[in-house]
Image (tube, helix red, strand yellow):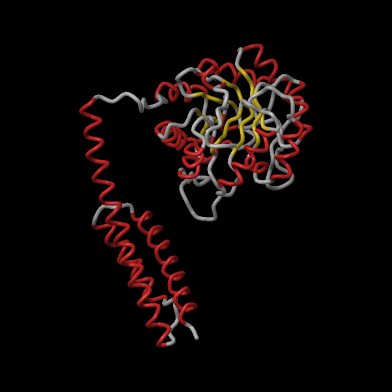
Amino acid sequence: MTNNTTYNNWLRHIAGNNALIIAGPCSAETEDQVINTAIGVKKAGGHIFRAGIWKPRTRPGNFEGVGAIGLKWLQKAKATTGLMTAVEVANPHHVELALANDVDILWIGARTSVNPFSVQEIADALRGVNKPVLVKNPINPDLALWIGALERIEKAGIKNLGAIHRGFSSYKKMPYRNEPLWQIPIDLKTRFPELPLINDPSHISGKHENVFDIAQTAIQLMFDGLMIETHINPEKAWSDARQQITPETLAGFIPQFVPPNDRVFNPGLLKNFKVLRKDIDDIDTELVNLLRQRQEKIEEIGRLKLKENLAIYQKERWLDILNKAIHNAQENNINQKFIEQLFRLLHQESLKIQHRVFKENQV
């Protein structure tokens, strides 16, 4: 993949200028459930019907999908509603079965995209196939690994390519199931602006009550579409019941997913943007200069510690800095979590600087 790669705009052929909506249950459970959910998705205004046929589970014994029989149900759902269908594939056998049952779109899940060997096996099975393929981000926040998976599929000859952002696993306590880390998909879109980028708010949120907010954020960030888990009876779903919504809820959401028009500005608004952005640029320049001054002070402290044979890391001083920063954030109505993260990065860099000073000045 190169920055100037032009991708077939297959997504626009389906959704026009609207956000693409892929919706359906986490898992296909029964034929009635699949067909009735597909009817609900069609009525809500969805474009593509998705359902999990094979489910990668963390521990054995959990529901791992109905398997190939579910592909027949998807065929019936497609015949009933006219919706295109999409399934996750995790190995060449899945690809073979999905293609044999006329599935329209394939996607590679996060647990698969993390493994280049598995992605390459799928890529080899896709050679000569003329269907859209979507690649979810790996479970860990590694942009290069995500790009690598996309490249392997592209090198197999797939022209209708797309990426799905479903968030990243984290050990931290947070309000979501997976951490959005929006900067990573933004970096992907910046490098490959023509690559369709779809958001999966269901897996990010982990709770149905947060799906809309995550989806709305993605639309405002110029994502091209959404993949939303939808079930006719979420409370009784066989997998991921907590994060699925009903088709009726989806119908209420879709009219609000209006992509921003970033190209139409009136002259007065454009002038205001230029003034404000110039102010931000000036502030950013000042911030960098202040960071340079801070670095110089850290280097001086490092030389003093070396001279007096003091430890680089001093717990009491670090906690004092952090507590003052959080207190100042609270007083100035700034996000305290953001300030904490920022100062942790500053402290990490300070330790690196002092370590460098020690190495450079030791005899």
Please count the marks in the image: 0
Q: Nearer the viewer, residue 279 or 327?
A: 279
Residue 145 % position (x, y): 61, 46
Left-right relation of 126 to 362: right
Residue 102 % position (x, y): 72, 19
Q: Nearer the viewer, residue 183 or 144?
A: 144
Q: Nearer the viewer, residue 309 or 214?
A: 309
Left-right relation of 170 to 330: right
| Residue 117 occupies quadrant | top right
In the rendered image, the vertical position of residue 346 relative to residue 227, given as above or below: below
Residue positioned 56% across, 33% down in the render: 235
For the N terminus, the quadrant is top right
In the rendered image, the vertical position of residue 144 relative to residue 265, given as above or below: below
Left-right relation of 72 to 51: right
Q: Nearer the viewer, residue 345 or 287?
A: 287
Residue positioned 50% across, 40% down in the render: 185
Residue positioned 38% across, 58% down in the render: 342
Residue positioned 29% across, 53% down in the render: 285
Work out which residue is located at the far bottom of the displayed protein and give it: 308
| Residue 23 occupies quadrant | top right
Residue 209 % position (x, y): 45, 36
Residue 129 % position (x, y): 72, 24
In the rendered image, the vertical position of residue 185 relative to residue 18, given as above or below: below
